[in-house]
Amino acid sequence: MMDVCHHLNDYHVSRPIYSNRVFDEVHQRKDRETRSLQERLKGTCGCNDKWAVRKIKGILPILDWLPKYPVKQWLPGDLMSGVTTGVVCCLQGVAYALLVSVAPVYGLYSAFFPILTYFVLGTSRHISVGPFPVTCLMVGSVVLTFAPDEHFLRPANVTGANETLTETWMEVDVEAREAQRITLACTMTVLIGFFQVAMGLMRAGFLVQYLSDPLVGGFTTAAAIHVFISQIKTILSIPTQNHNGFFSIAYTLFDVGKNINQTNIADLVAGLMTIFIVMAVKEVNTRFQHKIQVSIPIEVIVTVIASAVSHVMDLNSQYGASIVHSLPRGFAPPQPPNLALIGNMLGSSFSTAFVGYAVAASVAKVYAAKHDYIIDGNQELIAFGVSNIFGGCFSSFVASTALSRTAIQESTGGKSQVAGIISALMVMIVILALGPFLQPLQKSVLAGIVVANLKGMFMQMSEVPVLWKQNRTDCLIWIATCLACIVFGLDVGLLAGLVFEMGTVVVRTQFPSCSTLGHIPDTDIYKNMKDYKNIREIPGIKIFKCNSPIYFANIDYFKEKLRDEVGFDAVRVFKKRNKALKKIHKLIKKGELQMTEDGLAPVASMGVDNKAFEREQGPEAVNKTVQADVKVQVDWTSELPVSVSVPKVHIHSLVLDFSAVSFLDVVSAKSLKLVVKEFIRIGVSVYIAGCDGELVRRMEALSFFDEEVTRDLLFVSVHDAIIYIQLESSSGNADDLFAEKVSQDDKEPPLFTDDEDLIETYDNQHLAIHGLSN
């Protein structure tokens, strides 16, 4: 019942004190229905017409949205968007082919084939499917590892050269190298597709959640650095060796510095001008996007001008500029992957599949939230997997998406994947007809376009100081992942970043925040004693809170913090008390101590000599005293008549606030049960408050409760437990508030069994090692 008080923001609530048992009885707790695996499968796979239609539309989303496509409203925007995005896809495809270390024409294939299958299988309406620089570089690193230039050297056929020169002069067999590299890239792309399809079928889309924003930020920034370093040699047009793996950036920079004197000025000027112009115009597009209806396609403009200038001035012949050369018309015939290469690229393929999907899913979620529709993460995995398998069989390399290209598709009016299929048609036109017009284009211009598009990734570095202020652990994840990817390479660095991220999670749960709670006067609120001035600790009661799940890795830390907060070790107190009791029993039997109304007192201090005391009692009485089982009640808070240092216990009740504890495992449940018994046997009552219903069910399943540790120690809230303790203390335990009476007689608490005592007395790991050695 709620009563409105004089102050509008105040309220009073009048209700009974609830333990979990009473609350369940009053409000009729329901038992959860548990279904067998067979019943679950039957419910999931129940075949009827509606279920079949829903599943077919789930596998082929085009059957769901295409019949509902509003032609008049959406088609004009999709046409404009598709044409604009298609031109950008062509140029980015040709440019990103440099990252994979294959001929530029394969970049056009990669911008065409994946779109066809995603149009049928994808659930995002806005992403532009095609090459992404990070995944292209990851594929390129594998290509260069297994097909470096050194593997394709052959004797050069030099006319007029002497015999010695003919034997030593070697050249690269470009045709054989290109054939092997595209085979490697396509095989890896197919393998990436199979990994993605398998993860989609296993409903493993949730795995991408392990790639946190700090980890992705550090990874993509390091990838941008790798891409930038890899393009320096193209912009300068100087020869370098192919380096991958550990310290590849350092080796590449060393080669660049060693051959810097061979820089081609024409390529350098073209590359730098491209970077400057593209970045400047993109900045204008960003700042005035609310005024400019269609973004300026600066990559297209630069490419057309650069191709025309190179053709007119004949930069290749006159200045030795490196150009695209061959960009043949038409499609390459389909070819199966080389199965013999698969074993060498399993790890790299899985990491690339993971990264490609993570990037695509994150971009898709951004636009799905913006336009109020839902994407299916598992179906996205299948869509990209099939796209990569299909594309890999048609000489394409790995497909994902790029934020810049997707932003163009959305900002120019794209409403659905119809824009994507129109962009594919534009790419097809270039492949079939316009390809030769790009043959005079300098490669340094393509490299400049790649570098200019890295600006967004490099700008992520500005987030590091902000992240440091917000959460230092997340900032360390960002820095560690970035450094690991720079030093060890992208695939190994990503794995190292994941391990470091998981390590921070383990550390944060293994060493959780624990605190002593105090009471805010005149409220039912309990807060950390260190955080507030207007707070008080309730005399005789300790409230301990753990802000983490409790499991095998942190149960020892939990017990250590609990000992620190209560100020004593319950096991040590129990043993010291037993030792003191044994000495007191011996003194009583010897007649050196006597029971009085005030407690125990030495016989000599009462004016009675031990021998005289024995004579007055008579021999029978003495024998009876010696043989009788002496029951002694000792006030442990006062000074003891024996020389045993027993730690003081200043509390009579302990309340464990488990409102932030989400689960227990077998080890922690067993240890926690023993902790409760430790306190009970030294006369400290233990109560657990704030347990979620799922946690209580888990405790029941783990056999946490027995005759001594009952469900009556569970309370709905800390305040319920505190009021119950105070009422019990004020009533002297005469009447229990609950139906079942709690025994509070004068007997000592029951001792642990030998096994339980050993578990608490000795270290578990030492016992395990000792058991293995026997």
Image (spheres, helix red, strand yellow):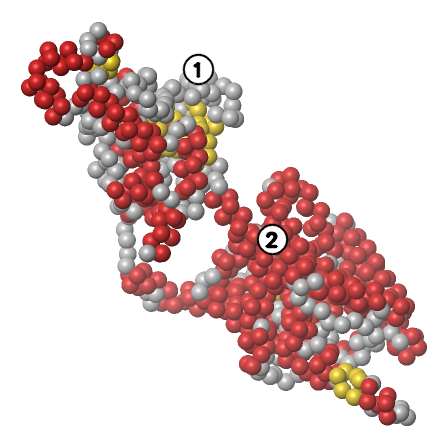
Q: Residue at x 79, y 76 (%)?
A: 324
Q: Label 1, label 2: how many angstroms apart (C-alpha)? A: 52 Å
Where the C terminus falls, by quadrant? Answer: bottom left
- How many neighbours does mark 1 have within 10 angstroms: few (below 14), some (14-19), or many (20 or more)? few
Q: Nearer the viewer, residue 186 or 415?
A: 186
Residue 555 relative to residue 197: left or right: left
Q: Inspect the image, locate mark 1, and give the three-letter code of the amino acid beneath it.
A: His
| Residue 582 image label | none
- Label 1 element class: loop
Q: Residue at x 87, y 74 (%)?
A: 321
Disc 2: which residue: 215
Q: Residue at x 29, y 35 (%)?
A: 677
| Residue 6 image label | 1
Q: Quadrant of residue 740?
A: top left
Q: Residue at x 29, y 63 (%)?
A: 38
Evaluate whether residue 569 shows in this view: yes
Q: Inspect the image, locate mark 2, and give the three-letter code of the amino acid beneath it.
A: Leu
Which label's residue is closer to the chain start, 1 or 2?
1
Q: Nearer the viewer, residue 423 or 462?
A: 462
- Label 2 element class: helix
Asked if marks 1 and 2 touch (Cβ < 8 Å), the reply is no
State the residue lying farthest toward the left: 620
Q: Position of residue 182 (x, y in %)?
A: 66, 78
Q: Position of residue 7 (x, y in %)?
A: 46, 17
Q: Quadrant of residue 625?
A: top left
Q: Position of residue 756 (x, y in %)?
A: 28, 42
